[in-house]
């Protein structure tokens, strides 16, 4: 019954190695909760392999040159680091930095502004975005999966569907099932905090203390009793990007208030227009508290996914900490924006405390995603 993996999928699986939580064994890695799986989309090995194949298939773009993996590459911890903003078909640039897909199974809302409610919904959008995969409709994808013999066999085995019975619902369910296996924990921090092993350096331990106390980072990048996602799955304005469009906010906000755009329209607008991108979650909720607010990023594997923030505007972890230390201002002297989240204020960290915080974040890399050439240089 189990026909196990596609040649392509096998390559993918080998590359990720131990990262994948297999369908039979959903025990999450140390430091992570169980992966939530929707009742109508159960995990099976065949479905996961199919999702892996779709995730890596460049034929599903208008030029045949871009797959999901182009911007979420396994060897770059499922990002396109070091690009500040993504590059899609014809080298078109979007407006936002590609977040990692690792542990996105735990996010309750997808995208920097949370405009997508589930992994199943999320993958519909990059296919149609003119600066990502560039298709006009999903029809070309269906043509490929309905006619290609490997795909039609697989869709039949996984969903019992063939020909015109195969729909985008099946495509997106398979991709989501694959993404739910891209789960990664068991970092030096996890081994120290949850298992009591001496896995962190003294500097990193001091950094954790600052993370929880003086820096108050943990109020948004959360750590629970037995697990740590390092995100509260909520949205905050921490002073990135919106500073640049402060004077245009009334006009831009007005456009979104008037337009009552559909999700698909918002997807295209925010990824093709730099100024609209900076409106953040406001584009979705039209709540003034959400102006310039973006989703709290997970900090797992953060040391290997530079540059940082929704616009990729901050190059190093040290500069991120300096931004927080200045009270939500990247370059000292820049104005503080009017919509800054209440949790962001100057921290009075010393230079060595800043180093400690950076060292702590370097303890959040899972061994599968460590860059071999980095380990020598890290503190
Ligand atoms: C051209 C580059 C590009 C391609 C191709 C692409 N993505 Fe992305 N992906 C991004 C960017 C940029 C974002 C953030 C966009 C935003 O938040 O507005 C993103 C966001 C995501 C997220 C949300 C993560 C989070 O933290 O909320 C997931 C999941 C994801 N992509 C999966 C996929 C899948 C599946 C495909 C293929 C169907 C795909 N991506 C294709 C660049 C890309
Ligand atoms: C009020 C909530 C909040 C607090 C407090 C907070 N963060 Fe963040 N953090 C966020 C949000 C929201 C983002 C994404 C913002 C954006 O892209 O505009 C973010 C982004 C980051 C990023 C970049 C993530 C990426 O994927 O690019 C790092 C690193 C980071 N924070 C570290 C810290 C550290 C260290 C502290 C403590 C000094 C801290 N944060 C305090 C909410 C917070």
Image: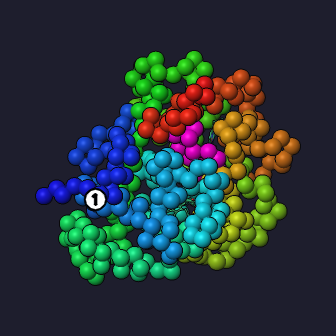
Residue 176: in sight, yes or no?
Answer: yes
Up the image or down, 286 lies above or below 5; here it is: below
Q: Residue furthest right?
A: 333
Q: Is residue 35 left or right of residue 58?
A: left
Q: Where's residue 332, x and y in %?
A: 83, 41
Up the image or down, 175 lies above or below 106; here it is: below
Q: Is residue 16 left or right of residue 43?
A: right
Q: Is residue 323 left or right of residue 263?
A: right
In the image shown, does 243 or 22 lie closer to the viewer?
22
Instruction: Tell me the quarter of the image containing the N terminus.
Output: bottom left
Q: Where's residue 22, x and y in %?
A: 28, 46
Marks counted in the figure total 1
Residue 47, image quadrant: bottom left
Residue underneath mark 1: 6
Q: Residue at x 48, y 28 (%)?
A: 189
Q: Does the segment drawn in magenta span residue 298?
A: yes
Q: Residue at x 41, y 41 (%)?
A: 184
Mark 1 is surrounded, within 10 Å at the Cα level, by few (under 14), some (14 to 19) or many (20 or more) other residues, namely some
Q: Where's residue 223, x and y in %?
A: 49, 34
């Amino acid at each position: 019954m189990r026909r196990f993996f596609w040649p392509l999928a096998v390559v993918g699986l080998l590359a990720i190695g131990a990262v994948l939580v297999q369908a039979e064994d959903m025990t999450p890695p140390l430091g992570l909760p169980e992966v939530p799986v929707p009742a109508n989309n159960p995990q099976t090995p065949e479905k996961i392999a199919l999702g892996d194949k779709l995730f890596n298939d460049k034929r599903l773009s208008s030029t045949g040159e871009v797959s999901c993996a182009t911007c979420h590459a396994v060897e770059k911890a499922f990002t396109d680091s070091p690009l500040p903003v993504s590059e899609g078909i014809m080298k078109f640039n979007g407006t936002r930095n590609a977040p990692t897909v690792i542990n996105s199974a735990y996010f309750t809302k997808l995208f920097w502004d949370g405009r997508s409610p589930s992994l199943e919904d999320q993958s519909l959008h990059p296919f149609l975005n003119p600066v990502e995969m560039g298709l006009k409709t999903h029809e070309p994808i269906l043509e490929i999966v309905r006619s290609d013999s490997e795909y039609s066999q697989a869709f039949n085995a996984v969903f019992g569907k063939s020909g015109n019975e195969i729909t985008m619902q099946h495509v997106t369910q398979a991709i989501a099932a694959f993404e739910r296996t891209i789960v990664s924990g068991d970092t030096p921090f996890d081994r120290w905090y949850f298992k009591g092993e001496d896995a962190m350096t003294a500097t990193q331990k001091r950094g954790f203390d600052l993370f929880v106390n003086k820096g108050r980072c943990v109020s948004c990048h959360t750590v629970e009793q037995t697990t740590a996602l390092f995100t509260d799955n909520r949205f905050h304005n921490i002073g990135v990007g919106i500073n640049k469009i402060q004077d245009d906010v009334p006009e831009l906000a007005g456009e979104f208030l008037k337009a009552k755009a559909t999700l698909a329209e918002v997807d295209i607008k925010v990824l093709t227009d730099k100024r609209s991108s900076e409106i953040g979650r406001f584009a979705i909720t039209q709540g003034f508290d959400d102006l310039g607010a973006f989703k709290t990023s997970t900090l797992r594997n953060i040391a290997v996914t530079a540059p940082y923030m929704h616009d990729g505007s901050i190059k190093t972890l040290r500069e991120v900490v300096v931004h927080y230390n200045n009270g939500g201002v990247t370059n000292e002297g820049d104005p503080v924006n009017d919509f800054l989240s209440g949790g962001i204020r100057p921290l009075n960290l010393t230079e060595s405390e800043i180093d400690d915080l950076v060292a702590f974040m370097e303890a959040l890399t899972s061994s599968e995603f460590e860059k071999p050439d980095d380990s020598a240089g890290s503190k």
